[in-house]
Image (cartoon, rainbow, N blue to C red):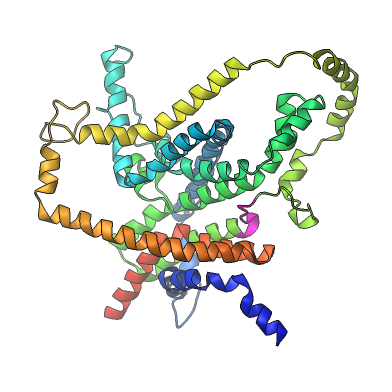
């Protein structure tokens, strides 16, 4: 009886509403998708054999993984120092920077992708500026290639990397760095040995989120890339629109889901800081081994010990340097990243005041004609009001259900929390595929 009462009182039950919604929206469609891929009720793996039997399909799959890995690496290289500098800023500056990072999602993904076409196109802003200054004689091929795909994907996914990193970095005790410096460690050594290992949960969570979301990218690669830069999700969408081979589409979609699920199962997710928790064997991740000192490095470290002792004694009572140049470089870097994130949205806003017959940059003149056209058309205002109503309802429901789920997950067993978190976040690359599976099931019932 006591055991039953303990089970009922466990906070894990607070996650049931979230999982019920996910089961209806994602779980059931994915099950139907999987059954279709196996040619239910006969059940066979012929569709998977046919997929891997075509070299073009395998190339698109490998290309999707490659693009996702590279985009994730770029987001980490740019996002980690940005998150570190945001964390080191004052509270008011940090709040403003986080607002600038998060405000990016107030603009539609499709609109931001269109903005990059305006910026990088043959007649776009960059080529026009270079031609006007006489630096080039012909427009540069800045669009419809792999570089443009990376620019667009990193622009969209960079906040997904920055926000988890900032969340973890804010929980790191800064006095640990001061203690390391007081014992003679250089700033880089103190960062690498103390701060970076403590920030690894944010690195892992941000990288996995970016990678899994990049696997499901469709609009940006299709709009900015060439024919050779197709992603598997774009390939699936084209199959749905053309041949609509139900079993083949289902197999392709589930292969993409399997890749994301495999990555989540291998690396897992951890949004919590390790600070203040005992470091048991279960938390000894593979990258801790990469950070350990090799035998040669330890030997060189011992040789340098007398020199560091003399240097520490000599500088013990010296005034600390202001580090003005490092602060200037850091500020310039953060400004550049924020400019990169916000400029496409600002560009679209400027273009909306164009007086010409079509959107162009720079505008031939300023006018409110597009706004008058918008508010004067009942179909546009009706769609906007519907979007607002849906947004408010989804925000309220997500806040309530998500808060209950987060509270329950935070107070359950670590391994169970990790598994349930992977189940919640593993649906990210399937948000479009679940809709496709519903369409497949509907069309199958009509047949």
Q: Is residue 31 above or below residue 269?
A: below
Residue in the image at 80% along x and 15% along y = 317
Q: Is residue 216 above or below residue 247?
A: above
Residue 319, percent across and down? 73, 14
Q: Is residue 248 magenta?
A: no
- Is 447 placed left or right of 282 in the picture? left
Q: Is residue 82 above or below residue 375?
A: above
Residue 156, percent across and down? 41, 42
Mark yes or no: residue 142 visible.
yes
Residue 304 or residue 181, whichever sits in front: 181
Residue in the image at 42% along x and 73% along y = 24
Residue 201, percent across and down? 64, 48
Looking at the image, how many numbered discs can be counted on the residues? 0
Asked where in the image residue 191 lies, by quadrant, the reply is top right
Residue 133 or residue 87, whichever sits in front: 87
Quarter holding the C terminus is bottom left
- Is 416 placed left or right of 159 in the picture? right
Residue 206, percent across and down? 56, 47
Outermost residue, front direction?
92
Outermost residue, bottom direction?
1
Quarter holding the N terminus is bottom right
Residue in the image at 26% along x and 14% along y = 132
Q: Main secondary structure of the magenta part?
A: loop
Q: Which residues are magenta?
A: 265-272
Asked where in the image residue 247 lies, by quadrant, the reply is bottom left
């Amino acid at each position: 009886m006591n055991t039953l009462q303990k089970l009922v009182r466990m906070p894990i039950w607070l996650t049931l509403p979230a999982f019920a919604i996910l089961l209806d929206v994602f779980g059931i469609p994915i099950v139907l998708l999987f059954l279709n891929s196996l040619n239910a009720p006969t059940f066979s793996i012929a569709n998977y054999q046919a997929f891997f039997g075509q070299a073009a399909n395998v190339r698109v799959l490998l290309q999707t993984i490659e693009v996702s890995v590279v985009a994730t690496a770029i987001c980490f290289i740019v996002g980690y120092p940005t998150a570190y500098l945001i964390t080191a800023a004052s509270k008011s500056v940090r709040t403003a920077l986080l607002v600038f990072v998060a405000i990016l999602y107030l603009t539609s993904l499709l609109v931001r992708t269109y903005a990059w076409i305006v910026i990088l196109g043959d007649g776009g802003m960059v080529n026009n500026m270079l031609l006007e200054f006489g630096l080039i004689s012909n427009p540069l091929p800045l669009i419809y290639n792999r570089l443009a795909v990376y620019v667009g994907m990193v622009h969209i996914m960079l906040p997904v990397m920055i926000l988890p990193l900032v969340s973890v970095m804010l929980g790191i005790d800064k006095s640990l760095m001061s203690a390391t410096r007081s014992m003679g460690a250089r700033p880089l050594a103190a960062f690498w040995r103390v701060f970076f290992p403590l920030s690894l949960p944010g690195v892992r969570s941000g990288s996995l989120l970016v990678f899994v979301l990049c696997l499901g990218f469709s609009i940006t690669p299709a709009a900015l890339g060439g024919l050779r830069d197709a992603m598997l999700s774009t390939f699936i969408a084209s199959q749905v629109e053309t041949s609509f081979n139900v079993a083949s589409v289902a197999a392709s979609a589930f292969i993409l889901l399997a890749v994301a699920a495999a990555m989540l199962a291998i690396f897992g997710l951890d949004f919590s800081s390790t600070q203040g928790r005992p470091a048991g064997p279960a938390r000894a991740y593979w990258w801790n081994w990469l950070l350990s000192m090799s035998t040669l490095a330890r030997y060189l470290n011992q040789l340098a010990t007398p020199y560091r002792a003399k240097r520490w004694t000599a500088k013990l009572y010296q005034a600390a340097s202001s580090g003005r140049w490092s602060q200037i470089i850091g500020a310039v870097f953060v400004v550049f990243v924020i400019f990169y994130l916000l400029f496409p949205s600002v560009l679209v806003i400027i273009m909306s005041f164009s007086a010409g017959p079509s959107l162009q940059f720079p505008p031939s003149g300023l006018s409110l004609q597009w706004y008058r056209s918008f508010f004067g058309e009942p179909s546009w205002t009706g769609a906007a009001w519907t979007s607002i109503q849906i947004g408010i309802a989804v925000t309220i429901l997500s806040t309530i259900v998500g808060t209950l789920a987060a509270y329950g997950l935070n107070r359950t067993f670590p391994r169970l929390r990790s598994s349930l978190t992977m189940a919640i976040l593993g649906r990210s690359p399937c948000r479009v595929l679940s809709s496709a599976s519903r369409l497949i099931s509907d069309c199958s019932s009509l047949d």
